[in-house]
Amino acid sequence: MNRKRFLQSGVITLFGLPLLLKKNTLRGVFTLENADELKKWLKTGGPIGGLGYNVRYRPDSPSTIFVTDAWSGLQKSTDGGENWSSANSGISFRNGPSSDAIPIFAFKVDSNNNDILWAGTQNGGGLYKSTDGGDTWVKKDTGINLDPNPDAGSLTIRHIEVEPGNSNTVYVMGEMPTGVWGTEFERVKGFIYRSTDGGENFSLLKELNSLTRWMFIDPSDTDSILVTTGIFDRESDIDDPNETHASGPGIGVYISNDGGSTWISSNTGMDSSKSLFVGGADRDPDNPSTHIVATGNNNDFNKGIYGAVYRTTDGDQNWTDVSPNLPVGILGEVYTAVAFAPSDPDIVYVGSAIAIYRSSDNGLTWQRFTGGMGAPYGPKGVRSGVPIDMVVDPNDPDTLFINNYGGGVFKSTDGAQTWISWSKGYTGADIHSVTVHPSNSLQIMANGRSGVFLSDDAGENWQGISNGYAAFPEGFGVAYDPSDLTGKTLLCSDEHESYILRSTDNGNNWTPALYLETGEVNNRHGARNIRFAPSNADVVYAGFMAAGLHADPHKLDFSESLGIYKSSDGGQNWNEANTGLPTGAQAKNVTDIAISYQSADKLYITLRSGGVYRSLDGGSTWQDLKTTLPDGENWTDEWGVNDSIQRHSLLSCAVHPNNDEIILVGGNIFGIYKSVNGGSSWSQVLPPTELINNGTRDHGHIFSVVFDPNSPTNVYAAEWHGGMYKSEDSGESWSLINDGLSTRAVAKLSISSNSEYLYAATQGEGVFRYQIQEIATSISQNKAIPNSVKLHQNYPNPFNPSTTISFELNEPGNVKLTIFNSLGQTVKTLFNGYRSSGSHSISFDATSFASGTYIYKLEGEGFSVSKKMILLK
């Protein structure tokens, strides 16, 4: 199809930049020089999360740390991880639903020359090389077959190794898809490629029946090489006649004694009754004959085949089981990561999603560090995910960093006993929902693959609240109880096990309010939406659907789900409310709920298969609204010859705040439809051709639609492949508003009740914020600002520890320059007195101040203007 753009980015009149403070505190008014910034989305940098993979530091400069993420790419820190910046210049490959993700998995610092770096991508993106420490990258994968099985998928690079003493010899390993599904994961093969000319050309050395994960080359004999195979979330391409599933066991460790020409299995001493998927491995830095490997696989675990930890001291000829002793009642774990301490090889760490283990005797015995119920490893309240890679500080055996598959980067300085989140400012988080508190536009909650998080400063900082029951492996929906103005009463749900949880203490403790006993591999469901009735906070509705919508909106064989549940006591107790909804295959998958602002009994729901339904009696009965469509359209129409998604496959809905007969529904392919008579008739107001012209696919998915509650002619819609749309005429016409939205795969929208902020939950970059208008508070500066006054953005910003503030005056006079903290309290007056006309600069030294957001305000006769600045230490 012709993909020529049909619309340009819309122009939206805004009145000021947000000063991101805590609730009910100072906000500022700004000069017109900031007008362009007001039209942009701002990435909050959180919550933490993503599909992390490697974490590495430069040996010659350990404060320079790199981490990889399959959504946000390569991130670099030069201050030990306190601040991060993107390091993807020249890495051109993109994927994901909106073709914005930077899927970097593997990363390697050349030990021979630390300016030489290597990065490997997922899904056929290839291999990249940097010779300037990561500032720029060049593709270097000639000879690597990136698409070995076109019908199944593309190559994923999972490890890169450089021969000690010889930067010209480079090995590349990873997985080749087969297109065959095992019990829980795809069956994959592994590969080993080698280059002998610094990456100019590669040749295939070996294929194996399980993905290749780690390689270790003996520095004293570079012909001696060890390779491990397997990982926790892939299956081997081996038929196993002794099992009832398609995939067989792992294949363990392979070694070569001739530089990779031939390979032999080396699993002597490993227990065949335990998993042989070797996800973690490391070598003693002082003794290349000593290795420790960690095994485990989720599919094995579900069959009662548990992981183990093995140690060899004879160059991988024989292995000894040195697995940690587990507490009573724990039968086994899936071990996924290993790291020796370079400064003291007697200190070794092994990780699982449950606990981190520390050895002080080179791996012979272990001490277990974990927490309580739920997410036991990692910072409090954070769903840690799976520790996929970890490194120990080269000078301190008690300081280590872990990159998590699903939880961001963590740091410990006490030998794995306690942890702090160490990825502030960058995120690869896959967020499924976001909501803003009904009475506080700065207070938001998000839920997704990394768990449940709160922010009370519009997303500048995030607190994990995945405590206890809320430590879901996959989070789904969230809601604030609007009757609790403190924002401490919360509801959340998960995508797999059909829980709805309730907390009355800001997420420190959660109680199951509803549990519907799903969660098996092929029968997972969750409440995507939890909605309080605007007119009655006692009434809450939850809509359940089969898991996997965000993984594949195109999927057609999802199972029948659980439909609608209702609470009449603020979410404490729930009852089914499905009378009149269809049953059978794909039925009762509720994708969205829109409740009348005037009546808690009137609501609309959309179904992933089955159209749109209305209830006028609080869910007791439901009416099918798949009625008259415009000429030439029918709810049973299919999209294209080879795409059998029908017009009645819907993903979102919204109701007009002032007229509950006006509704919008977002289609899974067919754009947006509008009804002005409660669903008696429909018109298509955003056709799929417009979505195609602005997206990255030959179709579009409208994942979320919201009305502006105070200016309902303004409507916002999120499209999975093309980003954000705005209508200023109640949905009749639309324009793009993607400026600043670095990933356009938006899963959910939430707009504040005062129409100040619009928040977007994205796949791969956390939460974004869009300021619709500035809302004045009791401390706001609303005096007219004369053209003679300009207050510039401080530089640098963020800063540590000092910055410069500049301003301009056309007329002389008395002015005052004051610094406020995030509570609106004065922390320093930089100047208070007479200034001549012209340009002025004043330095601010924040050595004695804590990290955070601060406000600087310039005041004079007839004007007051403020801006924010961020101190990052």
Image: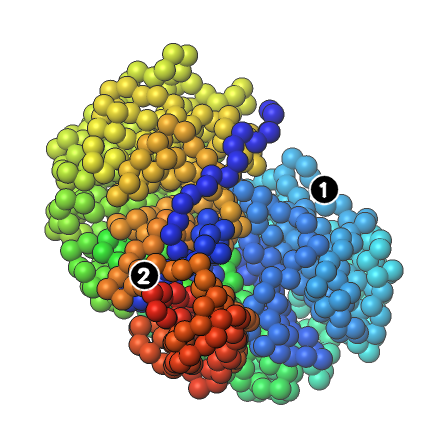
Q: Earlier in the sequence, mark 2 or mark 1?
A: 1
Q: Residue furthest top?
A: 631
Image disc number at residue 148: 1
Q: Position of residue 507 (x, y in %)?
A: 27, 65
SS for tag 2?
Answer: loop
Does residue 275 appear in this view?
no
Kind of residue sitting beneath label 1? Pro
Question: Residue 17 falls in which quadrant of the image?
Answer: bottom left
- Image height check: is 501 above or below 326? above
**Residue shown at 57%/85% (left/top)?**
397
| Colour convention | rainbow
**Residue shown at 18%/44% (left/top)?**
533
Q: Position of residue 348 (x, y in %)?
A: 57, 80
- Image height check: is 384 above or below 210? below
Q: Position of residue 630 (x, y in %)?
A: 36, 15
Name the residue that disc number 2 marks: 783
